[in-house]
Image (cartoon, rainbow, N blue to C red):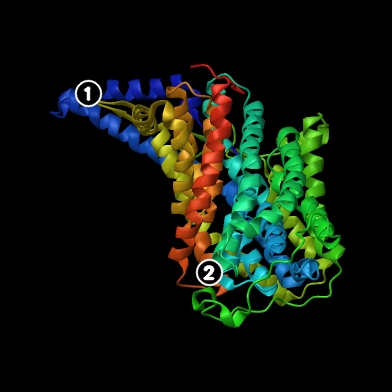
Amino acid sequence: MNYVRTNRLYPDHRDRRIDGRLQLARQAGPALGLDSGLCHRLCRVEENIHDMAAYTITGFLSAFETLVIIFGAILIMNTLKRSGAMSAINGMFKGVTKDARILAIIIGWVFGAFIEGAAGFGTPAALAAPLLISVGFPPLAAAIVALICNSTPVCYGAVGTPTNTAFATVKDAVAAGGADPDTWKMALTKWSAISMAVGAFFIVFVAVCVLVKLFGKNKSFKDALPCIPFIIFTVAVFDIIYLLIATFIGPELVSLVAAVITLFVSIGAAKAGFLQPKETWTFAPEETWDRSWLSTTEVPEPKVSDMPLLKAFTPYIIIIAILVATRVCQNVGMGWASAMKAFTIGTGKSGVILGLNWNWAILWNPGVIFIIVALLTIVIQGMKGSEVSGAWKDTGKQVSGAAIALLFGVAMVNIFRYTNVSSDVMDGSMLLIMARGLAALAGKAYVIVAPLIGVLGAFMSGSNTVSNTLFSSLQFETATILAMPQVFIVALQNNGGAIGNMVCVNNVVSACATTGTIGNEGKIIRTNIVPCIIYCAIVVIVLGGAMLMGINPVPLNG
């Protein structure tokens, strides 16, 4: 979505309007017995109120596109759950292996990445955790593992929504800095992926370590060591595809395609005994489990479905095909793809809402594609009317929370970014003032602070998308003040928001609800904070190291 305030795009227009009002104030003020200075200040107040209203509306409109993506992604997921397709996909894991460590990798990390790439917004842990329970995991172990593993793919969850949101937030600043926005976006996509890909090797191993230490018979990290060869193999397959797509195509398909391919490869490898531990590791008998591991509420059994696997995956095959065709064809200059992107709706060039010029490329929006495919799925999978209405109702309930956060979050950031503060002690936008404060406090150590801000945003809001909405502009401005590569600092924000998913309150509550472990939220957060810090340290080392080597993917003016 592209939007501009006309008085920003055409500053002379704004200046003429202000100057006209000030002249009228000077002329009318004495006649009314008012001091000219007071008239001046009143005019400024009116102008600021006008601007704040406009920035609020632009925020709502900007959030709308993201909400369409969220709605469409979750709708297709709920449609597949109601049709029985998701149950058929879950059936792939029957008979793969009896080793709980390998199942944690395949279901918790790879399958979770597939769900994240397709839908995001808390669905991975909510779907992967019950599946882990169905293969013999203690409910608490299932929740913890699923949450830790829901980190690597999150930058590109819901077909790239967090990364696209981070870019959209700083797009105007990138253009003002003299860089090509599309080039900058691809650099952000690439470097966000590089740091997360390196960390993936470690975080999967950490997840297995937590599993065997807290829930194993021996309570020993040594039980995780035999899984290292399979972890390296699985992560390597995922990372290769992940990095190639992030480098050459864009953010939409990074996690989704990498996870789908890795899912079939890892299942095939496990069934064939490739790189499998010599001794099978399983949990102790259920009667010996600690009571805190067990569900305190009833967990519904997964729906049984005999739907063929190809039919179950057909909606996602269609989605991937459409997104690949449009994004790749755009990059090679195909006219029809450009025409799709060029077809927009909006307020028109002249602007009709408080000087707002807003345009939305509706046919280019992945959420619109999701909604169309969800409608096709009704026919493809022969759904009943009750199943369809149930999917739409479920989606409405799930999206409502994200809608409120995004609508007002984007509006607030716009006000922070564009509303000027002028006084004897400070001058500039509220966002710029906050950036100056952070720069002064952290200095060059800000590279360590940047991902932690992302984690904090995700923890508070429950979403990397919202975290990026709130803090990407702040990170960008702070990087500019400190003369750091803006791409790297915004990438660290993106990474931090993704990593924060393993401890964010919304995801933890969702995982506890679906595993029946309500009341263990604090224990889960305390457990997962260590993997969270480890992952943050890794991305800082990777991107901080790149900074030390003098790398700046897209230098900006000023």
In front: 99, or 165?
99
- The circle drawn on residue 453 is none
Task: Give the residue at x 39% y 26%.
Answer: 443
Instruction: Name the front one of labels 1 and 2.
Output: 2
Mark 1 neighbour density, 10 Å: few (under 14) some (14–19) many (20 or more): few
Q: Where is residue 448 in the image (x, y as percent from the top left)?
A: 46, 35
The count of marks equals: 2
Q: Name the residue under label 2.
A: 512
Task: Tell me: residue 93, above or below residue 340.
Answer: below
Pointer 1 residue: 424
Secondary structure at badge 2 equals helix
Q: Give residue 510's position: percent from left, percent from top.
A: 54, 66
Amino acid marked by disc 2 = Cys
Does residue 345 appear anywhere in the picture? no
C-alpha gap between disc 1 and disc 2 = 51 Å
85 vs 53: above or below:
below
Q: Is residue 396 left or right of residue 80?
A: left
Residue 12 lies, with reference to residue 99, above or below; the image says above
Taking depth in this image into account, of 45 and 159 the one nearest to the observer is 159
At horizontal 60% and vertical 46% (from top left) the residue drawn is 65
Mark 1, secondary structure of its residue: loop
- The image position of residue 141, as x and y in percent, is 58, 67
Q: Which residue is drawn at 56% across and 62% down?
A: 213
Q: Mark 2: few, some, or many residues within 10 Å (few <14, many ≥20)?
A: many
Q: What residue type is labelled 1?
A: Asp
**Can see residue 36?**
yes
> As drawn, which residue projects farthest toward the top?
557
Residue 43 coordinates in the image, percent (x, y): 28, 30
- Classify residue 16 as left or right of residue 426: right
Q: Which of the two residues, 280 or 318, is positioned nearer the viewer here? A: 280
